Each structure stands twice: as C-alpha cells, then as structure tokens.
Image: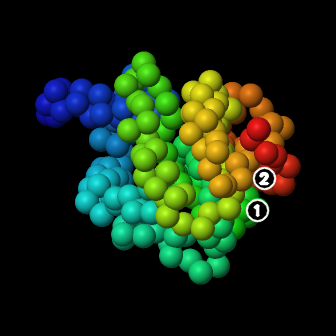
Amino acid sequence: MADPRSIEGLKQALQRLPSVGPKSAQRMAFHLLERDREGARQIGEAIRQALSRVNHCNRCNNFSESALCEICCSAKRDPKTLCVVETPADLDAIEQARIYRGLYFVLMGHLSPLDDIGPDQLGINQLLKLIADNAIEEVILATNLTLEGQATGDFLLDLLQGKSVQITQLARGMPIGGELEYMDSGTLNQAFSDRRSAR
C-alpha cells in the first residue's frame, strides 16, 4: 500500500502549478497513480531534463538551452527593435501572431513590492546594458495591462526617458487586465500595428 505521505506530497507539489487547487491536485495525483503511471514517469523525466538543460539566454533572458536562444541568433530578426515582455509565455503569444520580427527582452515577471520583486529581480540593469550596447532604435513596452504590468511599464518608461531610443507601447485596444499569453492573434496583430509613442 502506498505511503499516504507520498500521496500527500504529490498533491502538494501539483498545487504549485498555476490554477491548481486542492481538488484538482487530488484528481491529477490519483489519475497518475491509478491509471497512468507511465505518463507520470514521462512527466517526471521531462521535468528533470528541463531543469538540468534549460537556463536563460545571455542576451534576451528568455529560456534557452544554449548561451543565445534561436531568436537572438537569427539573422532574419530586426536588431534595431526590442520588445520588452513579462514572461516567456508572452513572447510565445507574440511569436504565434507573426506580426513582429525584432528582438526581445523577457523580464521574467513584473514589479511587485508585496512579493519582494523589484528591479534587481527583473534584470532591469541587463536590459539597460542591452539597449546601451546595441544599435536599438525602438523599444516596445509590451507589459500586460494588469496593475502590476502597467506599473512595470511606467517604471521602464521613466528609466528610458531621455535615452536616444524611441519608446512605444502596444495599442490600448487590448482589454484592461488582459495578459498577452491569452490574447488571440488578431488582437495582438492590431495592438502591434497600432502601437504608439509611449509619451
């Protein structure tokens, strides 16, 4: 018979996933143990491999298995345009819309004083160095339209004011409180096409 502590540990671990509460975690744990132990092994191995192989791109801070990610290495990207996003999921959403051909910087979050997330945790110095060391002409602030995302965008806007770079933001046709990860391609397309000067 399985050790109840092991089952409880699995349920607690599954609850660390976004939007997974106690009941969902219990359903997943019991499903994996009752009906799909091979699936559980595959999930465990995939997580182990990802943790050992995936780090951050030295340039854009996105997830990468090499020093530079595929986007940063591509000669087909416009090196003069830099889009700043909060998460790798936001980057993926923009890439799927196929409207943007420049480079990125991924903050890996947003400013959140209550969670002790400040500029140092978001790699802001790395972003400023990237802009200073490269011939970037436009920085697109594509933070989410949540309170935290807007505060992060405003903070970056203040930091970049006075630098010899054009600063734009995505058009505000995107819904307030919306997150890029969940936008459809048409909405993202329109937001990029209608982007405007940040100030």
Q: Where residue 198 sits in the image (x, y, percent)?
A: 74, 41
Pick the quarter of the image with the C terminus.
top right
Asked if disc 1 and disc 2 are in contact, CB closer than 8 Å, the reply is yes
Asked where in the image residue 14 lies, by quadrant, the reply is: top left
Left or right of residue 64: residue 72:
right
Q: Please, what secondary structure does the residue beneath circle 2 have?
A: helix
- Whether residue 103 is visible here, answered yes or no, is yes
Q: Where residue 7 sits in the image (x, y, percent)?
A: 23, 31
Instruction: Write the residue at 71% across / 53% down.
Output: 166
Q: Which residue is nearer to you in this view: 181 or 66?
A: 66
Other-residue count near label 1 (Cα within 10 Å), few / some / many at <14 / 14–19 / ≥20: some
In the image, is residue 28 above or below residue 163? above
Labelled disc at residue 68: none
Name the residue that disc number 1 marks: 99
Instruction: Write the residue at 54% across / 57% down.
Output: 131
Q: Where residue 175 sits in the image (x, y, percent)?
A: 77, 32
Q: Which residue is nearer to you in this view: 63 or 59?
A: 59
Q: Where residue 100 sits in the image (x, y, percent)?
A: 72, 62
- Whether residue 143 is visible here, answered yes or no, is no
Q: Please, what secondary structure does the residue beneath circle 1 have?
A: loop
Left or right of residue 184: residue 23:
left
As drawn, the residue found furthest toward the top would be: 114
